[in-house]
Image (cartoon, rainbow, N blue to C red):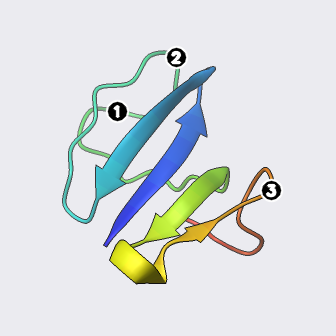
Amino acid sequence: MHAVIKTGGKQYRVAEGDVLELEKLDGAPGDAISFDVVLAVGDGADMKVGAPIVDGASV
């Protein structure tokens, strides 16, 4: 399953277990962070695309 999130004015395609190097976020390296601005989530035919975000989704 993949998701497209938006943070810091940029969009990222992410999957479970991915490690991202992001700018300007509070937290120490290795901390888990949750994102609630999810633009799309799913896989293949089960992909949900938001208008502009997917309601209730969190990554």
Q: Nearer the viewer, mark 1 or mark 2?
A: 2
Q: CA distance from mark 3 to mark 2?
A: 26 Å
Residue holding disc 2: 24
Q: CA distance from mark 3 to mark 1?
A: 32 Å
Give the mark, 3 or 1, whose residue is nearer the N terminus.
Answer: 1
| Disc 3 to disc 1: CB gap under 8 Å | no
Give x and y (percent) for residue 15: 28, 59
* Vertical side of 31 occupied by 34: above or below: below
Q: Residues within 10 Å of mark 2 (few under 14, many from 20)?
A: few
Is residue 37 or residue 43 the one in the foreground?
43
Would you say 30 lies left or right of 28 here? left
Give x and y (percent) for residue 58: 59, 67
Amino acid beneath label 3: Ala
Q: Which residue lies at the image location 43% right of the left edge and 59% below the top edge?
A: 3
Q: Which mark is residue 51?
A: 3
Q: Which residue lies at the image location 64% right of the left edge and 71% below the top edge?
A: 57
Give the mark, 3 or 2, whose residue is nearer the N terminus.
Answer: 2
Give x and y (percent) for residue 32: 37, 54
Amino acid beneath label 2: Lys
Is residue 16 or residue 4 the one in the foreground?
4
Is residue 12 or residue 17 the one in the foreground?
12
* Vertical side of 39 occupied by 11: above or below: above
Would you say 55 lies left or right of 45 here? right
